[in-house]
């Protein structure tokens, strides 16, 4: 008998958690980074679709925490703790951070994909969360899914098909 797995969609500038075999999916990762966390003991997964590296550029005081790397990670950790995950057991995987368009003389400030990936790495290091898998960079889009039953991150892209990390 084939079992249906529950699918939880994570939109752009969104985050969510899943457990009991549910799958988290986000689509359309270009320069955005799909950051995932996983507690292998409790089998709880979390995913954030991060658009920008730092909330320092937020114009409003009440902003969407899932949008920025520096605010999405603490929010995701808090939600996972509330569900029973232990921060010291968390492992991270991330994908995306592409440079979708290139222009001559492009300033570093415009390299959002690279800056997003670097900001996520710095935040994970600050929280002492090891990065156990990563597929960032390039110039193509990605769709990712993390399975809360085993922490496997499936990455689909047009040029490279599907791979698992």
Image (spheres, rainbow, N blue to C red):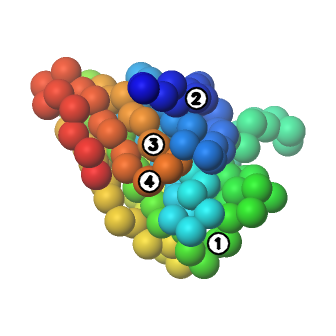
**Residue of label 3:** 146
Is residue 160 in view from this perspective? yes
Residues marked 3 and 4 touching at CB (< 8 Å): yes
Closest to the camera, between mark 1 and mark 4, is: 4
Instruction: Name the residue nearer the viewer: 101 or 39.
Output: 39
Q: Real-space Cα distance between discs 2 and 1?
A: 24 Å
**Residue of label 2:** 6
**Residue of label 1:** 87
Q: Earlier in the sequence, mark 1 or mark 4?
A: 1
Element under disc 1: helix
Is residue 115 in view from this perspective? no
Closest to the camera, between mark 2 and mark 1, is: 2
Element under disc 3: strand
Q: Residue at x 46, y 43 (%)?
A: 147
Q: Earlier in the sequence, mark 3 or mark 4?
A: 3
Residues marked 1 and 3 touching at CB (< 8 Å): no
Q: Quadrant of the N terminus?
A: top left
Residue 91 in percent (x, y) is at 48, 66
Element under disc 4: loop
Q: Real-space Cα distance between discs 3 and 4?
A: 6 Å
Q: Earlier in the sequence, mark 4 or mark 2?
A: 2
């Amino acid at each position: 008998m084939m079992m249906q797995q529950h699918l939880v969609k994570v939109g752009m500038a969104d985050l969510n958690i899943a457990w009991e075999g549910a799958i988290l999916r986000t689509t359309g990762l270009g320069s955005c980074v799909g950051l995932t966390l996983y507690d292998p003991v409790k089998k709880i997964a979390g995913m954030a679709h991060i658009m920008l590296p730092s909330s320092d550029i937020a114009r409003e005081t009440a902003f969407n925490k899932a949008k920025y790397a520096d605010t999405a990670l603490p929010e995701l950790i808090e939600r996972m703790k509330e569900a029973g995950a232990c921060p010291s057991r968390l492992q991270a995987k991330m994908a995306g951070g592409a440079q979708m368009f290139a222009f001559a003389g492009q300033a570093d400030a415009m390299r959002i994909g690279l800056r997003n990936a670097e900001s996520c790495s710095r935040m994970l290091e600050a929280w002492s969360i090891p990065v156990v898998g990563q597929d960032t960079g390039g110039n193509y889009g990605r769709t990712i899914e993390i399975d809360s039953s085993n922490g496997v991150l499936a990455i689909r892209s047009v040029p490279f098909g599907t791979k698992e990390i």
